Amino acid sequence: MSKFEEIIGKYTSGKATLADTNAALKEAGANYQLDPEKNILSEAEKRATTVGYYLDQVNGYGLLDTGTGTMEKVKLVAGKLPDVINQVQSDGTTNMAAYVYIAGRKYEVKGDAVAECDNIYAI
């Protein structure tokens, strides 16, 4: 897990505020910050967020990283995003890397669904 992922994980798990997260990202040398108007996870949204043993148990609010340098707040229902993010090839790879950080965990995005990834972690 990278230093940046650990910082984002603490935020999505509720262990750090958005302001503390941005300060930690800056100190760690990240070239991005979370937008206080777009990336805020409210207390109600955190309480509505759950992850479980199975991928379809991922529900609630997290941050989507598509490699653009910004993150987008997203809502997942039963392990699915509201829109298709990338295309899944016949061999299971995708045409674009994308990840969701939710409740202190990281998942790969395949199409509109979360999937386990090699570097999944829990904070």
Image: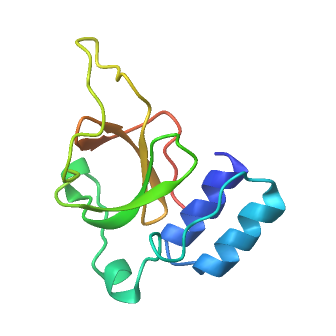
| Residue 115 can be seen in this image | yes
Q: Residue at x 40, y 84 (%)?
A: 42
Q: Nearer the viewer, residue 82 or 57?
A: 82
Asked if residue 63 lies left or right of residue 69, the reply is left
- Residue 2 screen position, x and y as percent: 68, 46
Residue 36's image quarter? bottom right
Residue 16 shows up from this direction: no
- Left/right placement of residue 81 relative to residue 107 reads left
Please identify the residue farthest to the top as the structure is shown: 91
Q: Residue 102: x percent and y percent?
A: 41, 61
- In the rendered image, the vertical position of residue 107 relative to residue 89, given as above or below: below
Q: Nearer the viewer, residue 89 or 79?
A: 89
Q: Is residue 32 left or right of residue 97?
A: right
Quick one: which residue is furthest to the bottom in this view?
43
Quadrant location of the C terminus?
A: bottom right
Kindly identify the residue that appears in the image at 52 percent across and 50 percent down.
Answer: 121
Q: Where 35 sits versus 42, above or below?
A: above
- Which part of the image, by quadrant, shows the N terminus? top right
Q: How many numbered marks, from 0 up?
A: 0
- Indicate the position of residue 79 as horizontal and vertical percent values: 22, 52
What residue appears at the point 44 percent right and 70 percent down from the top-left corner? Answer: 38
Residue 52 drawn at (x, y percent): 29, 60
Query: 80 or 69, which is in the foreground?
Result: 69
Which colour style is shown?
A: rainbow
